[in-house]
Image (cartoon, coloured by chain):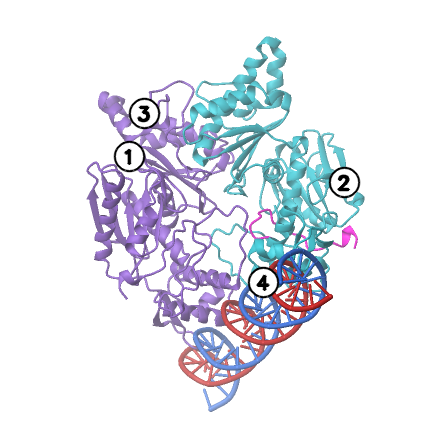
Chain colours: A purple, B cyan, C red, D blue
Amino acid sequence: MTASEVQRSSSRTESAPPTTVQGFAHGKAPAGGRTGAPRRALRPSSKVLPEHARSHNRSLVLQTLYHEGSRSRADIARETGLTRVTVSALVAELMADGLVVELGQREDSRPGKPATLLDLDRSAFVIVGLDLSEHSTFSGALLDLDGAISARAEVELAGSTGDEAVEKVVALARTLVDQAQAPVLGIGVGSPGVVDLAGVVLSAPNLGWNGMPLQSILAARFGVPVVVANDANAAVLAEHSFGGAAGDAMLITIGHGVGAGLLLGGTPLFGSRFAAGEIGHVVVGTDGGAVCACGKRGCLETWLSIPNLMKRLDELPDADHDRVLTEAGERLGIALAPVVGALDLSEVILSGPTELLDGPLAAATVETLRARTMAEFHGSLTLRMTTLGQDIVLRGAAVMVLSGQLGVS
Amino acid sequence: MTASEVQRSSSRTESAPPTTVQGFAHGKAPAGGRTGAPRRALRPSSKVLPEHARSHNRSLVLQTLYHEGSRSRADIARETGLTRVTVSALVAELMADGLVVELGQREDSRPGKPATLLDLDRSAFVIVGLDLSEHSTFSGALLDLDGAISARAEVELAGSTGDEAVEKVVALARTLVDQAQAPVLGIGVGSPGVVDLAGVVLSAPNLGWNGMPLQSILAARFGVPVVVANDANAAVLAEHSFGGAAGDAMLITIGHGVGAGLLLGGTPLFGSRFAAGEIGHVVVGTDGGAVCACGKRGCLETWLSIPNLMKRLDELPDADHDRVLTEAGERLGIALAPVVGALDLSEVILSGPTELLDGPLAAATVETLRARTMAEFHGSLTLRMTTLGQDIVLRGAAVMVLSGQLGVS
DNA sequence: TCATGTTTGTTAGTAAAGCGTACGAACATA
DNA sequence: TATGTTCGTACGCTTTACTAACAAACATGA
């Protein structure tokens, strides 16, 4: 089985109804495609068939193995509440699909028949992750099912926009797919701008994309599942899966612009126009501020974006740098306080250049947040830098594929 | 069947996994109670059985009848995607439970066998709704399945706190339950303060409640399903079901204090400590403000709570009243702008005294919001007063019961 | 008037998915 | 060696929704 033989593209971004890789090498016909376009299911107006329960339980077994590591069938049965019989059947299916392998018998000496340990075959598939959020470079990587990076590639944007930029994305993906030593589970893309649930980039000014159907373009070219989402949304998913963030968290990306990804109850928030997290042009404070490119005065970006921050630091002597950073942090705190209060967030995470953010700026932000919200209730409000560094969007893109294809996260 | 014979209490607040009234007059044994305490299912670590699909589809039929009115079995089959056979079976079950009735044959003249129309028996059950959010009064009502109020009752708080206040709640509920002309589907309660998913009032300073298990107290006393939630959360649900609010909305309650209820993707947000929407003590602006009871300076409540607003209006001549109201509205807009931007909200609703809110205050709020967020993206941001008046919490409490017991909303 | 077509709701049989019971295999311990 | 424990599987049962087929009741056209 080569990478290009992998079938069944999917455009789901949510993790709710797990579209599994069921029927991978499994003989069965694809069984009449699902409802094509992903809709926002406001009313749950979809019937539920027994087969849906099956794929849910399939993901449940997969998830147990993914998180807990090597377990026996009986272990999984105990942990999931399913019977050993059912687990055996599901495991047989997963083994036929090449997702699960037997590791051999458990070593320790206990009474009873020794257990046969199982695990996810973590090298069975690779994931292609793409990060389009940097200013002049598209970067990508091959990741295994644990999110570890095994190969990298990048392409210079060189001022490309529109279809030209799309071709750069395709070329980058092609490079990585060709390097893959195992079937490609899917391609995950973190893009700047506003991205809808179908993976259409509704608006990305820097790339000149307006209604660019990136998901379907990539899916058509590569014939594998593709997920496209906003970069900050991808990042907060990575922080949740790999960085230990709780189910309620907000991740602030500070770079050329300022954005945010929100995770509420373990589910990413997209917003009514898919523009959730677009806080860069919210006005902060009641005392003016610099004029922003958007025309308003005192936008969060004027205080906090890296170009603006660098410019102000360059203009001032070193002695004043801490003051500038502290003021930027205070502004961030002022902007976030109502959000943290309204959403009852317990965790705020910063992503961006550590040398600028992780110091007076972060300290001022957390202090401002505590002073402006109900410290009594938010006693354990934490603010920290991401632990995932530069690869956060790449790994978030991988999480989206894992979540969409295997139902694990 | 009298009201007190209704069984199966439930403490679910979410609408996600609908706990139905299955097995109402249906002979079958309760079939081994569900998982007792509602947990936040961060990981969906629960197996799915075919029977769960059954109750989902049951709610789907119920929901179709609830919203669309009288339909035939064949109509329901077409709208839900289920087969006529399955719909017939589900309808038979619902009729045995007394929830659905046949209305007779359809009148219009079409080819084919005339259809038998069905509808929810909207007088089969009543709902008890309680509103504990007013300052000196607990009010309650009997509501039918459409949310219409058929009887009212209230009890003076008279300074009661703690267990004494709980007894007032019980007495009020008793009055209403005794008046019920049909079985009570459940009791819904909108309480001030922080309420967890099990209906425990973690903190309601005005009532002296700290960890008060109101849900279980009422469930034990009345033997019917009881749902307790925060008043603003109840209110936003009412606005969604009866007031035409979209699936993403924020409702601000302005009264003795200031609070908010958030609906995101049709689901209420509770927050990591169940304190979502507690925005009354978020500091607004960067220019000081009055000292608040909480000790901070410039809390939203100091600008906007009705007592503070009245005090300021009383101190000033009529000519200055518009200025005071406009300033209050601006402050609300300043506080909400980051929330609206971060959540990509399309609808903000105000609840409180119309004579104060619906004028310069609301106008200033919406103008401030538009000026401080990305008006380009938030082109259709609307701000309006609730259309449900004083009964919004009562009707929201009814929605919680409907949602929890029937899976409709 | 009568045959034909349409729509409704029900009956009968089938496939999928889970459960419970029971069994052999393989181990530890008395 | 006998007993108990644990694992994984085989068998049969229940639940669920589906497909196919049918009678009932209507409209329409020859």
Foreground of the two, B206 or B261? B261
Amino acid at dot 2: Ala
| Span shown in magenta | B1-19
Question: Sequence-wise, which precedes: disc 3 or disc 1?
Answer: 1
Determine the chain carrying the residue at label 1: A
The answer to whether the residues at label 2 and label 4 have Cβ atoms under 8 Å apart is: no
Determine the chain carrying the residue at label 4: B
Q: Could you say which disc has been placed on residue A144 in the image?
A: none
Q: Quadrant of the C terminus of chain B?
A: top right
Q: According to the image, label 3 marks what residue?
A: A293
Q: Height in image: D21 above or below B160? A: below
Q: Could you say which disc has been placed on residue A206 in the image?
A: 1
Query: Residue B173, percent across and down?
Result: 74, 42
The Cα–Cα distance between marks 2 and 3, rounded to whole angstroms, is: 61 Å
Label 4 crowd bin: few (<14), some (14–19), many (20+), radius 10 Å: few
Foreground of the two, A340 or B13? B13
Q: Nearer the viewer, mark 2 or mark 4?
A: 4
Q: Quadrant of the N terminus of chain B?
A: bottom right
Query: Residue B276, percent across and down?
Result: 52, 37
Determine the chain carrying the residue at label 3: A
Q: According to the image, label 4 marks what residue?
A: B51
Mark 3 lies on a secondary structure that is loop
Q: Could you say which disc has been placed on residue B171 in the image?
A: 2
Determine the chain carrying the residue at label 2: B
Amino acid at dot 3: Ala
The answer to whether the residues at label 1 and label 4 have Cβ atoms under 8 Å apart is: no
Residue drawn at (50%, 20%) of the image: B330
Q: Height in image: B372 above or below A247? A: above
Label 3 crowd bin: few (<14), some (14–19), many (20+), radius 10 Å: few
